[in-house]
Image (cartoon, grey):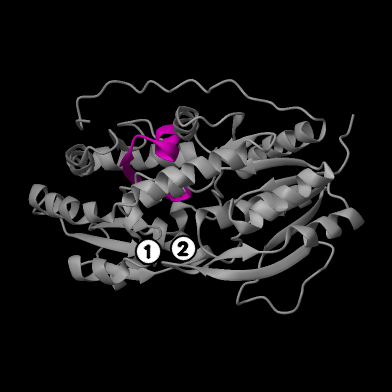
Amino acid sequence: MSTPSLRITLVSETFPPEINGVANTLGRLSDGLRQRGHQVELIRPRQASDIGPGDPEQLLLCRGWPLPGYPGLQWGQVSMHKLWRRWRRQRPDVLYIATEGPLGLSALRAARRLGVAVISGFHTNFPQYSGQYGLGLLSRLLTHYLRWFHRRTAITLVPSASQRLELERRGFERLGLMARGVDATLFNPARRSQALREQWGLAADDIAVLHVGRLAAEKNLALLRPCMAALHNNHPHKRLRLVIVGDGPARAQLEQQLPEAVFCGAQRGELLAEHYASGDLFLFPSLTETFGNVVLEALASGLAVVAYDEAAAAQHIRHGHSGALAMPGDQAAFIDAACWLLEEQETLRRVRLNARQHASRQGWPAIIEQFEGYLYNACRGGQPVDAPAPLLIKPESSTPRG
């Protein structure tokens, strides 16, 4: 029996072509739901690239306010009454609220007043971000607000088992797991470019140590400097070059701290995929991710990933087989993991092949179908709480430590 199409409203303060994990996920969900025959309405702040109002049936653009410290990102603002009037005329079956700012709050209030089903997503760990900036009180206030917000939705979708455990510890309820996928056709080792590597000053047998992501304090990028120093000391006969893809408020400081690194700025689409595929080792030192889409993109591109054992890395990396993991916060273990991957050429080759093989099976279609199931359940008035996913017990390994 075929399932009926739904009128679905997605509410987000960020969306492509903006470059971040939330925008990437919302773009994939929107496209995937439309391909499955659903009507999708998008409510988001107006972006600089927007021309005209767009299709009024499918898009509502609202006013945006700059987010301090995050150039190009905005808080959205629209009155609850405007949404209430809009949805009285054309009522959605279900809302998905991806961001909990003023726009998300107005949408939540309007939907509850109309009795429209609402599910939410926990995409960004703002309490932990504020803790990284030494704002402990703000972190506690944000946790209180976010818990209040998500308790008013049918279910809150989180991208990783580790994030769900953390939110449960903080008193969040009705949590469902919805992972992320990767386009393994776009992110593919076949896009490796020797011409690009030569621009980085690297020959075919040299090692490009890659990092891709937003350059901000909460990403723990200070670890890149001692990690590169250790790699050079442990492998003095290898030519290594750190290549950083991305932009953000910490870029100028990083350029001073890492004068030998190549800074490529933000990249998109096929150019981004080419940068990934032209690397060899991928360093991801962040401790504040709800998921970390770049980990899957790096794995799909055939890179050997070094990361802390949480979020996407915990789900998708088998230590010593398809990457190398360190206990969260153990900087020495992280550095050891990176050095170990370069000890033997065969180790690096094998890990990269295994990474690609695993990531190539992590497509978006199954994620979209799972998301659709959550939407249908919310429309029926259900509040599913899927059983906690079993924690993966990774094989013991003596190398690297951590």
Quadrant for the C terminus in the image? top left
Along the viewing direction, whichever of 72 and 235 lies nearer the viewer: 72
Q: Is residue 258 visible?
A: no
Amino acid found under the numbered disc labelled 2: Leu
- Verify whether residue 304 appears in magenta: yes
Along the viewing direction, whichever of 52 and 3 lies nearer the viewer: 52
Q: Earlier in the sequence, mark 1 or mark 2?
A: 1
Percent x, y of residue 259: 18, 70
Task: For mark 2, give the secondary structure.
Answer: helix
Q: Which residue is at a point 42% across and 23% down the rendered structure image?
A: 392
Horizontal arrangement in the rendering, residue 261 relative to residue 18 (left or right): left
Q: Which residue is at a point 65% across and 64% down the rendered structure image?
A: 77
Quadrant for the N terminus in the image? top right
Horizontal arrangement in the rendering, residue 21 relative to residue 135 (left or right): right
Percent x, y of residue 151: 62, 35
Percent x, y of residue 383: 71, 27
| Gap in angstroms between the C-alphas marked 1 and 2 | 8 Å
Task: For mark 1, give the secondary structure.
Answer: strand
Amino acid found under the numbered disc labelled 1: Val
Q: Which residue is at a point 18% across and 54% down the rendered structure image?
A: 228
Q: What residue sits right under mark 1 in the picture?
A: 245
**Mark 1–mark 2 contact, CB under 8 Å?**
yes
Looking at the rendering, which quadrant does residue 279 occupy?
A: bottom left
Q: What residue sits right under mark 2 in the picture?
A: 272
- Verify whether residue 293 appears in magenta: yes
Highlighted magenta segment, given as a residue range? 292-316
Horizontal arrangement in the rendering, residue 270 relative to residue 323 (left or right): right
Along the viewing direction, whichever of 202 and 255 lies nearer the viewer: 255
Horizontal arrangement in the rendering, residue 249 relative to residue 15 (left or right): left
Percent x, y of residue 273: 47, 59
**Front label number (1 vs 2):** 1
Q: Is residue 52 visible?
A: yes
